[in-house]
Image (spheres, grey):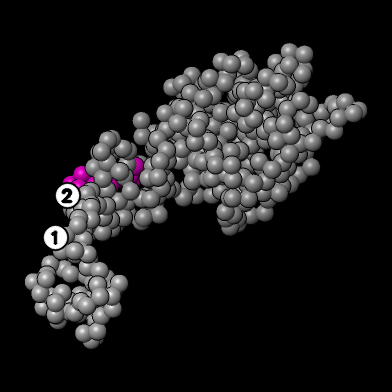
Amino acid sequence: MTIKHLLTLFIGGLVAISLAAQRLDSINATVANDTIQPIEQDSNQVLVVDTAIFDNTIATVDTVACSRDTVIADLSDSIYKARLQALPFVIEMPYNSVVRAFILRYVKRSPKQLARIQRKAAYYFPIFYDALGRSGLPYELCYLPVIESALNPQAHSRAGAAGLWQFMPSTGRLYGLEINSLVDERMDPIKSTEAACLFLKSLYNMFGDWTLALAAYNCGPGNVNKAIHRADGKKDFWSIYPFLPAETRGYVPIFIAAAYSINYADLHGICPEAIEMTENTDTIQTNIRQHLLQISEILGIELDELRRLNPQYAKDVIPGGKTYSLCLPADRVTDYIDQQEVILGYRADELINNRRAEIDLAQQTGLSGGYSVNGVTYYKIKNGDTLGGIAKKFHCSVSQIKSWNGLKSDNIRAGSTLKIKK
């Protein structure tokens, strides 16, 4: 299934949700303005919610120009609650004061960032939907990379996590991702999503609850199990909430807020933005070493676009030697196949064939004080040596020795080294 087909399914889903939201708005006047109480806490324990994961992620999003003002209405809690319950999701979307705070962080404090995330979602969500559907997982897990990376496949954290799903290297390798100097499949949208599906499925099998699986995705299964034990064995995110790390307390509320904000952004006046990436793409397989610049200059595709479509190639090099994926605009795949020989030959010595496959070790010469490497002999000058005598030893002329070594006179000094290129 192509990105174009998946995009059609994605847009259809958003239309259905938008219609549901419009129906909800028709009851705004009659909804009671009930107040949601904050999370209960013990008198001896202050429940701090760490907002760093939201703040750090949203800060990486480039803002875009918006042609209309964002509408920030003072909506009642019942409106937010009704809208969340109207979403066709398996994962619970409860509402409380922490969820509300993060919803307002998206729609009130970061509307331009939200608009940009929306336009990226139009490209990446179909990829997520395809993998989640084949894995039998809830489609709403597509909001997880929104809070992890703001849908930036090249996102890196200070802790070393990378990609849309923010895998650490050890976890990525555990779930089959190749990570080395040239290739980092944590940044491959398709392969990292497949790995994330495996990881999320294992977390759900461990806890039997999706909010606990999300919490474990953030802080690790060990911390979630400790929180369950401290909560007298209760297996519910909101029951173990006081015993989780501060960042994880905010993790599920941010997830809920992201789902709300993306689905109801238009009702808050968040301007829709045109998609910035190639909609219709195709992926081909290659086992030949090549550079993205070769493809760019021969096919006339912007190098930055190729990098966006293939963010897993850290140095712009497809290593070859085994099968790798190459994502191209669908209308250029035939051109690539037809011109592959030209592409592979273009600036090959500079871009691809610039690594030495074999290096000669230094060899002692038959002449005392000399050694040879890669066809060049290095001779250490001894007391009493003259250029004429050295030239005679190596069957060359004095002028050649002076040229090879940049000498302007016949004066030489014992202990120095001369290059003899013969």
Task: Return the x and y of residue 90 as percentages of the image width and height.
Answer: 60, 20
- Using the numbered discs, state the Cα–Cα distance from disc 1 to disc 2 in whole angstroms: 47 Å
Q: Residues within 10 Å of mark 1 (few under 14, many from 20)?
A: few
Residue beneath label 1, please? 366
Give the residues drawn in magenta, as a range: 327-341
In the displayed orientation, state which residue is furthest to the right. Answer: 43
In the displayed orientation, state which residue is furthest to the top. Answer: 233
> Which residue is painted at 76% across and 44% down in the image?
73
First in sequence: mark 1 vs mark 2: 2
Q: Main secondary structure of the magenta part?
A: helix
Q: The disc labelled 1 sits on which kind of residue?
A: Gly
In this view, the residue in front, 138 or 399, is 399
Would you place residue 82 above or below residue 385 in this image? above
Q: Quadrant of the N terminus?
A: top left
Residue beneath label 2, please? 341
In the displayed orientation, state which residue is furthest to the front. Answer: 384
Would you place residue 297 above or below residue 333 in this image? below
Report whether 395 appears left or right of 65. Answer: left
Instruction: Choose mark 1 or mark 2, whichever is in front.
Output: 1
Give the number of callouts: 2
Q: Circle 2 — which element?
A: helix
> Which residue is painted at 23% across and 52% down in the image?
361
In this view, the residue in front, 23 or 331, is 331
